[in-house]
Amino acid sequence: MQKKWILKLCFILCFIILLPFSFCFASENEKENEEATKKELLLVIDECVNDIKNEIKSIDKMLDQLDKTEEYEAYPAVRLNIDTPFFGLNSMVNNKLKIKNEVSTVDVASGYSIKDIVNNKSIKLPDFMVGNIVVSTRDVKFDDNISIEDAKESILKLVQYIGQTQNTKELVNKRINYIFEGYIPKEKLEKITNLENRLDEINSKLVSTDKDILCIKLLNNDEISKALVEKYYTINNKIYTEKKLLDNMLLSYENLQDIEKEIAIIEIENINYTKDVSKEKENLTKDINIALLLNNTKSILTEKQKNLEEYEKNSSIEVEVKDDVSEQENKNEVKTETRHYGITSKHIIEYEKELLKTLDEKIQYYLPEENNENTNEGEDKKEISSDEKKSLFDDVLKLYNDYLAKENKFYLDNLNYILRDTTYKLSKLPDYTDANTVKEIKYIYISLPTELDNMLDEYGTKYTFKTDRFTNNLLDRLLKISKCNVQVNVEYDKFNLS
């Protein structure tokens, strides 16, 4: 009995001795996790600061070029619009880069600016507040001593300042064009207008092939057809690039000569391209291969349907559900349910399925004896008149265009929904977001809207073939941010903020 008591006592003593060590190990692991998270957040901070730095450099470069122009030297009004204190372009830039929100009156009075953040590698965060008014701020350095909470708050503010800097740059571009437009030599203005008109004409000829290139895509899937499809987008991108270059009143005559040479090359390229498209379309429509038409279209639309379903899958997550009754009955049983986030206009998915069913019905009617996997090389089994082939061809084109228009609407609706949903809910839980979510904030608030604007400028939704590329690009962006949206919603639900 005495031995058992001694053993128990030894065990208790050992447990008491080892207990502090177990807490040390646990504490050490937590510290390592915090340090890893902090490093990740500091990388995001560095990326944001570098983005701001590059934008400011770009603005400074534009401003430095102004006093080297002939117009600056020749016209006093131009110099006044640029150099006048308080009202000139230089003063306007400095004023636009000042930070006036969520800082103290002392900071505002001292001219606290986004440039200070870049130069000092630090940011001012609220220290003492009365209601929504910031009474005083503290300076937070972007180094290893920063806390995780301060790092997260810094990222949220830096993202705002990136947007502020980009808006300033855009305003400078517009202001420069406004200031110089009235003083640019007439000859140069006419040259710019002439080059813009030539680009518009090239674009008109390119989009005139829209229906023809779609015919080629659906009627054939060999290397020639694929090359013609890609060539369409290559020429479109060149037109877009030159148009962006021409949107600048400070272009020199040498710049204009370089652009003119490039436009001449695009013109020749586009003439040859339209000839090749016309020739290929004529060859393919002499005697339409119904098997190729139906099965190529089915293959393309089936792939698009898979993408819709992939997005739907990406926007859902399995979560544990607490059920007091089942917990009492079986404590080991874990109930889950699938929750869907970030999906709107779901009726479009069903509509697209109906279009595919319509296409399947046409395949069953016109290709009853063929296996869908082997029809590409088969001959038409059913006798079909040329008029019926043309009618079927028109029906398939209409179906394809209908599918594409609805698909584009679905992705645009969902992207707008996700952006609104994510940004709203992030604003409600800044203290709860994890490091991964915080890292996505810059992309959601800054990069994605810029990408969308550029894609709309380059492609738009007016022409079928441009819409197709625009839609594919939308899908890429949606898949990228849908997981972030799910994570934000899970956190939002977890804290019952709704």
Image (cartoon, grey):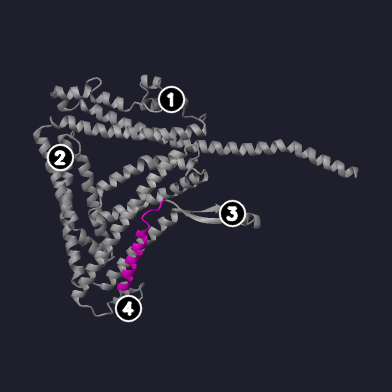
Q: Residue at (18%, 22%) from the top-left corner?
A: 80
Residue 232 found in image quarter: bottom left
Q: Which range is magenta? A: 342-362
- Classify residue 104 as left or right of residue 275: right
Residue 162 vertical position relative to residue 400 in the rendered view, above or below: above
Residue 330 appears anywhere in the view: no
**Which amino acid type is marked by label 2?**
Gln
Which of labels 3 and 4 is toward the front? 3
Q: Amino acid at mark 1?
A: Val
Q: Which residue is mark 1?
A: 134
Distance (Cα) linking label 3 and label 1: 45 Å
Q: Which residue is mark 2?
A: 257
Mark 1 or mark 4, which is nearer to you? 1
Q: Secondary structure at mark 3?
A: loop
Residue 124 placed where, x, y %?
43, 26
The amino acid at mark 4 is Pro
Secondary structure of the residue carrying tag 2 is helix
- The picture quadrant where one finds residue 285 is bottom left
Rendering coords of residue 404 (x, y %):
29, 59
- Choose the circle earlier in sequence order: 1 or 4: 1
Cα separation between marks 1 and 4: 75 Å
The number of callouts visible is 4
Q: Which residue is mark 3?
A: 323
355 within the magenta span: yes
Proximity of marks 3 and 4: CB atoms separated by less than 8 Å: no
- Residue for badge 4: 368
